[in-house]
Image (cartoon, rainbow, N blue to C red):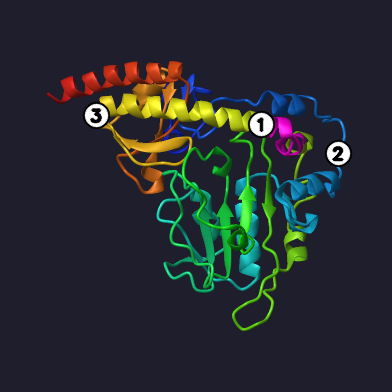
């Protein structure tokens, strides 16, 4: 049996064995890849540098969101944006970070790298939020818009919301940094590309303007932060054809999600509520992830999210679900026989 490092269980996607045949460990849209977006990426001209100012792309993204192009900042990935924003917040005099109870690990890693202290008190802090949240796929709470120095809303899974509604209205969204990574919604996680929408200028409680120092943040980005393939992905993202494909995929994912939850509950799993194309579930007995991986199935251990004993599962097609049930039935039987 090929040894797989334990770190492989704490991250989604490919590992020492390559890509799993049935990968429940990622939140990528299982209906993907989006054909139109994939065609755009494959047709990208990688023989030339993109426009270093990304003029057309920023205009397209701004029009899609109904904001000024000056508010759109590009990033090579969500993680790159997280580290850059954290460094910038440190330069702005922020000394602490406020994190959700369960969160993407790079929020904390970036804070540690730049010496921001973890505090439950959001006053004058850099506050991170994600909605739908990861790993639970639920609404974010509580919000600290009146007390935080900067609030960043990670909207990686907003396009993959299958139920419920966003908890911030348009005016409140205008007060926060919004981080978008469409590659998950398009089923193309191997293409790294992200963008930020900066808050619109707004009044502080003492009547002055918050100093967002956009130019400094722009200078912190490397030259050509996006390559040709990232540009193609983001440009396709705003097209009507791609958005129509996404809308159709959500209908399919809702059906698949209901089926997947029902199958797990029949096996005795406890399933936490979720509004997204993924959810957390706890099995009746501990899982042997290495054995499952040998059967071509990968789950995401949620211990690194602060949920020991739970697993995050992306919603996959019925064929993958049936393979999961068969593998779980075999491994669970083996575990029970061994324990007795």
Mark 2–mark 3 CB contact (< 8 Å): no
Tag 3 secondary structure:
loop
Instruction: Work out whether residue 189 or residue 260 is closer to the camera in this orientation and state it.
Output: 260
Q: Quarter of the image holding residue 262?
A: top left
Q: Nearer the viewer, mark 2 or mark 3?
A: 3
Residue 263 in view in this figure: yes
Instruction: Work out whether residue 49 or residue 166 is closer to the camera in this orientation and state it.
Output: 166
Q: Nearer the viewer, mark 3 or mark 1?
A: 1
The residue at which mark 1 appears reads as 244
- Relative to 23, residue 322 above or below: above
Residue 288 in view in this figure: no
Instruction: Work out whether residue 159 or residue 314 is closer to the camera in this orientation and state it.
Output: 159
In the image, is residue 327 part of the stretch drawn in magenta? no
Q: Residue at x 62, y 47 (%)?
A: 78
Segment colored magenta: 232-243
In the image, is residue 235 part of the stretch drawn in magenta? yes
Tag 2 secondary structure:
loop
The N terminus: image quadrant: top left
Residue 189 in picture, x, y percent from top left: 61, 33
Residue 140 in picture, x, y percent from top left: 46, 54
Give the mark nearest the N terminus, 2 or 3: 2
Task: Farthest residue to the left: give it.
Answer: 340
Q: Residue at x 60, y 32 (%)?
A: 247
The residue at which mark 2 appears reads as 49
Q: Label 2 crowding class (10 Å Cα cut-off): few <14, some 14-19, many 20+?
A: few
- Relative to 210, residue 138 above or below: above
Q: Nearer the viewer, mark 1 or mark 2?
A: 1
Residue 129 in picture, x, y percent from top left: 51, 56
Say the numbered circle drawn on residue 33.
Answer: none
């Amino acid at each position: 049996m090929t040894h797989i490092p334990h770190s492989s269980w704490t991250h989604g996607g490919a590992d020492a064995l390559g890509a799993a045949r049935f990968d429940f460990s990622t939140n990528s849209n299982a209906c993907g890849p989006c054909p139109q977006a994939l065609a755009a990426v494959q047709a990208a001209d990688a023989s030339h540098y993109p426009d270093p100012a990304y003029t057309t792309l920023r205009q397209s993204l701004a029009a899609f969101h109904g904001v000024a192009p000056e508010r759109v900042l590009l990033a090579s990935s969500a993680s790159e944006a997280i580290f850059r924003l954290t460094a910038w917040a440190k330069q702005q005099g922020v000394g602490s970070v406020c994190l959700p109870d369960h969160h993407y690990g790079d929020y904390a890693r970036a804070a540690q790298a730049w010496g921001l202290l973890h505090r439950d008190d959001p006053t004058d802090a850099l506050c991170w939020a994600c909605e739908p949240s990861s790993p639970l796929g639920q609404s974010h709470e509580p919000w600290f818009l009146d007390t935080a120095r900067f609030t960043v809303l990670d909207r990686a899974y907003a396009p993959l919301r299958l139920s419920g509604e966003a908890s911030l209205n348009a005016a409140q969204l205008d007060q926060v940094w919004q981080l978008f990574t469409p590659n998950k919604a398009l089923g193309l996680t191997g293409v790294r590309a992200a963008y930020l929408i900066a808050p619109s200028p707004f009044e502080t409680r003492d009547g002055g303007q918050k100093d967002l120092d956009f130019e400094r943040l722009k200078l912190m980005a490397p030259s050509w932060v996006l390559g040709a393939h990232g540009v193609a992905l983001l440009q396709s993202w705003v097209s009507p054809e791609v958005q129509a494909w996404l809308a159709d995929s959500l209908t399919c994912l809702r059906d698949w999600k209901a089926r997947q939850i029902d199958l797990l509950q029949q096996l005795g799993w406890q399933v936490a509520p979720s509004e997204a194309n993924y959810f957390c579930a706890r099995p009746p007995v501990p899982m042997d992830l290495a054995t499952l991986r040998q059967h071509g199935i990968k789950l995401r251990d949620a211990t690194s999210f602060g949920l020991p004993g739970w697993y995050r599962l992306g919603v996959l097609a019925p064929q993958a679900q049936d393979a999961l049930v068969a593998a779980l039935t075999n491994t669970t039987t083996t575990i029970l026989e061994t324990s007795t």
